[in-house]
Amino acid sequence: MQHLSPEQFARLLQTSLFSDGVTRVVRPGGDGTISVNIVDLTAQEQGLARNALAEIARMTGLRFVETTARASITYLNDGDRAHTQSSASGSTISSSTIRIASERVGAGDGYGSFAFRTYMHETLHALGLGHPQDYGRVRDFSQSAIANDSWQMSILSYFDQDENTAIDATKAYNLTPMLADYLALSAMYGVTTMHVGATTYGVGSTAGGSLDQLASLGARAAFLLVDDGGIDHVNFSNTSAAQRIDLGPGAFSNVLGGIGNMHIAPGSVVENATGGGGADVILGNHVGNRLAGGDGNDLLEGRAGADALDGQGGDDRLSGGNGDDRMSGGSGNDQLRGGAGNDRLTDVSGTNLLDGEGGNDAITGGSGADTAIGGAGSDTLVGAGGNDNLSGGDGGDRLFGGEGGDVMRGGVGHDILIGGADDDRLYGDAGNDDLAAEGGRDLLDGGAGDDLLRGGIGADRFVFAAGHDRIRNFDRSADVIDLSGFAGLDRWADVSARLTQSGNHTLFQMNGHSLVIEWTRANTLDHTDFVW
């Protein structure tokens, strides 16, 4: 069993209608139209025929005109089956008669029915397309020579998606010609453009024709999207089913409760996608995408391009990928990862993980207890509300605690850490850092490097163990200096012996390290100002 490329599949459709393998087409008349006669059909059947012709016209640019006289394509409803008989001369199909028995059309059959699919199937025969293989001999998929022979690839297939055990798709009726049909029609009748402006598919559809029925048909519909321009949007927000929406050109997606029922044609670019109430997976493509998860615990991945990702409701996982991305987790406990590029990550509520990864990122937490990681690059992290854990990572970072008792780590690089109104812990780590306490009972630890530690309102603790640091705004009535990182300080006399006056400041020196306590007198400091 062979898996055919769409182009190989299309070639079979072009050459299999006639026994000699010659591709033949219907030639428009002098006025550029192809005549069709539907007078013998019931009103419902006429609607099916017109809608089938309209879908094919939209995909080919062919113009069909109705007549009550002799026509290039004549539709009848007698007999007990569906088949098409064509007459040809040279490379031209001179006339075709399509017979679709009325008993094959149920009450209310329209878009999303086997009857509509049948009208498109037989009309494609009348235009010169054949079956991908001989179904007189291949009566069951186990006998198939083609692994991907199903309605998912072509309306001309006899196998629905459930019957084909080699693909991941559920049974759904074709709303449009599928990819192999489109490629065959383009080769035979020329390429036309479709959906060149901003187009919405699904909820609020502006696509026209059968695609306007997507939102109401749900899992019953299988369709191909051919889009040649504009900023486009697939909106499947009206379902609670878990969906997998892949905007990659050539990709299959699981939408509206179906599996493998949406196919984006290679070369077509759809920019934006909105999920529904289920746990959705939404994947972008190589351009800037706007992806919205909706309710449910969603996974959004921007891939390449400058993307905007919004998790909305639920516990979501967002990944920006390459490009300068904007990401918002929405409500719920979310995980946001920026990837490469200069990204903006924000969240509203819940306990969240926000990781900028590469690039110079701007990260803002929400009202919950968030973990924010800058990663590589010069990042800006804002804790906002809640008891947050902020880590700058590599690069010169700026960290702002906001409300709540926050833990802040500058990481490698020259960092600026500013606490907030509550009791915060600020660690400069490596680099020459600037730490500011602001309100609350804060701990300031510069770590390695030459750091500036600035006290604020409240009883602050300044930790000094290495480098050449400065303490500013030291309040003897409330603050304390922690020297416990030095070995050999056993009593107050060991500390006071290392204190000297340097202008208006006190200088502490030990083992090649120094600490300046600004605007203090060495002879007024005592054991209550230090711990060791």
Image (cartoon, rainbow, N blue to C red):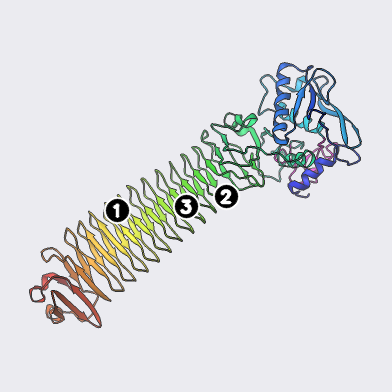
> Which amino acid type is shown beneath numbered disc 2?
Asn
Of the two numbered discs 1 and 2 on the same chain, state the one appearing first in sequence.
Answer: 2
Of the two numbered discs 3 and 1 on the same chain, state the one appearing first in sequence.
Answer: 3
Please tell me whether mark 2 sits on a helix, a strand or a loop. Answer: loop
Of the two numbered discs 3 and 2 on the same chain, state the one appearing first in sequence.
Answer: 2
Q: Which mark is residue 26?
A: none
Q: CA distance from mark 1 to mark 2?
A: 36 Å
Is residue 56 in view?
yes
Q: Nearer the viewer, residue 408 or 225?
A: 225
Please tell me whether mark 1 sits on a helix, a strand or a loop. Answer: loop
Residue occupying image coordinates x 50% and y 45%: 290
Q: Nearer the viewer, residue 278 or 346?
A: 346
Tell me where residue 243 appears, x and y as whole percent: 55, 41
Within-10-Å neighbours for mark 2: few <14, some 14–19, many 20+: many
| Image quadrant containing the C terminus | bottom left
The residue pinned by badge 3 equals 325
> Which amino acid type is shown beneath numbered disc 3?
Asp
Stretch of the chain drawn in magenta = 128-154
Residue occupying image coordinates x 47% and y 39%: 294
Residue occupying image coordinates x 78% and y 20%: 38
Please tell me in which quadrant of the rendered image residue 236 appears: top right
The residue pinned by badge 1 equals 387
Tell me where residue 181 appears, x and y as whole percent: 74, 39
Q: What is the chief secondary structure element of the magenta stretch?
A: loop
Please tell me whether mark 3 sits on a helix, a strand or a loop. Answer: loop
Q: Is residue 137 found inside the magenta-colored segment of the image? A: yes
> Which amino acid type is shown beneath numbered disc 1?
Asn
The residue pinned by badge 2 equals 285
Is residue 466 in view?
no
Please tell me in which quadrant of the rendered image residue 508 appears: bottom left
Q: Is residue 487 found inside the magenta-colored segment of the image? A: no
